[in-house]
Image (tube, helix red, strand yellow):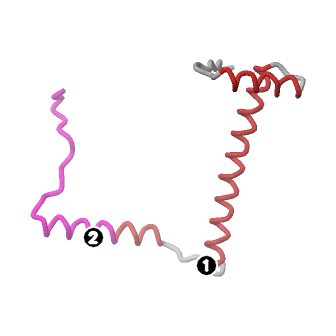
Amino acid sequence: MAILNIRNFDDESHQRLRMRAARNRRSMEAEARQILEDAMAAEAASAVAAASDLQRFVADLYDDARPEGVTDDFLAERRREAQRELGESGATEPGPPDAGGAR
């Protein structure tokens, strides 16, 4: 198990944590641990909900008939644009890093 030290914890917050721990019949350490675990669980649940909302939005957008190859098409288009931009600027695409061992 990992150990967490909290520095510069102001006196008022320390007192409030102590009182909260007492109300919940826990040590201050157990109360702080519970607060952190609850916060992390809420954050994880929020991320899952956001992903679910996004999936639902995409399904609604395409009536469950999602197009295929969109990522590949996008990448190919971006590569063509990059080549065109390089050609217009007269720049050359950088080659691989020097493998000569220079450090």
Do the numbered discs 1 and 2 sit on residues whose CB atoms are within 8 Å?
no
Occupied quadrant, residue 22 = top right
Residue visible at 13% across and 69% down in the picture: 88
N-term-proximal mark, 1 vs 2: 1
Outermost residue toward the front in this view: 12
Q: How far apart are marks 1 and 2 (CA)?
A: 28 Å
Q: Residue 80 carries which label?
A: 2
Front residue of this view, candidates 96 and 46:
46
Occupied quadrant, residue 80 = bottom left
Question: 18 above or below 44?
Answer: above
Front residue of this view, candidates 19 and 69:
19
| Mark 2 Cα shell of 10 Å, populated few (<14), some (14-19), many (≥20) | few
Task: Inspect the magenta stretch and tell me whether residue 96 lies in it.
Answer: yes
Q: Which amino acid does label 2 sit on?
A: Arg
Left or right relative to 66: residue 13 = right
What stretch of residues is rendered in magenta? 77-103
Q: Which amino acid does label 1 sit on?
A: Leu
Front residue of this view, candidates 97 and 6:
6
- Location of mark 1 (residue): 61
SS under mark 2? helix
Left or right relative to 16: residue 96 = left
Left or right relative to 75: residue 22 = right
SS under mark 1? helix
Outermost residue toward the left in this view: 90
Q: In which quarter of the image is the C terminus?
A: top left
